[in-house]
């Protein structure tokens, strides 16, 4: 039995209001998938990378920077 068949059998006994919620959720999942599939694979993770390498606050020796950040919390 396919998932589509299982879903069809499951919603047969549900009230129309609940079926409408299932349809809304299925449309949400479809639209979410379309948005993710539209992105090239490299852009999914790489869109989060970088951004601080040109910051004036993060230039210099990494250990000095770590010490300054740690001391800021003390």
Image (cartoon, rainbow, N blue to C red):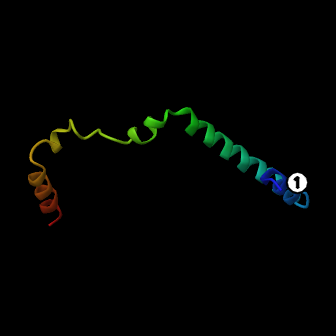
Residue 57 figure quarter? top left
Q: Callout 1: 10 Å neighbours few (<14), some, many (20+)?
A: few
Element assignment for label 1: helix
**Residue visible at 11% across and 58% down in the picture:** 67
Q: Quick check: 50 above or below 21?
A: above
Q: Which quarter of the rendering shows the N terminus?
A: bottom right
Count of picture labels:
1
Q: Is residue 29 left or right of residue 40?
A: right
Compared with residue 74, is residue 69 higher up or lower down, i.e. above or below? Answer: above
Along the line of sight, the residue nearer the viewer: 7 or 25 = 7
Q: Residue at x 88, y 57 (%)?
A: 9
x then y, percent, for residue 66:
14, 56
66 on left or right of 52: left
* Quadrant that contains the C terminus: bottom left
List the residue tagged with mark 1: 16
Image x and y of residue 71, in percent: 12, 62
């Amino acid at each position: 039995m396919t998932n589509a068949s299982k879903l069809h059998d499951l919603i047969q006994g549900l009230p129309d209001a609940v079926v409408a919620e299932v349809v809304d959720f299925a449309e949400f999942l479809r639209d979410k998938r379309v948005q993710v599939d539209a992105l090239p694979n490299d852009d999914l993770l790489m869109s989060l990378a970088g951004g601080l390498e040109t910051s004036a606050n993060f230039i210099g020796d990494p250990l000095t920077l770590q010490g300054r950040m740690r001391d800021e919390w003390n």
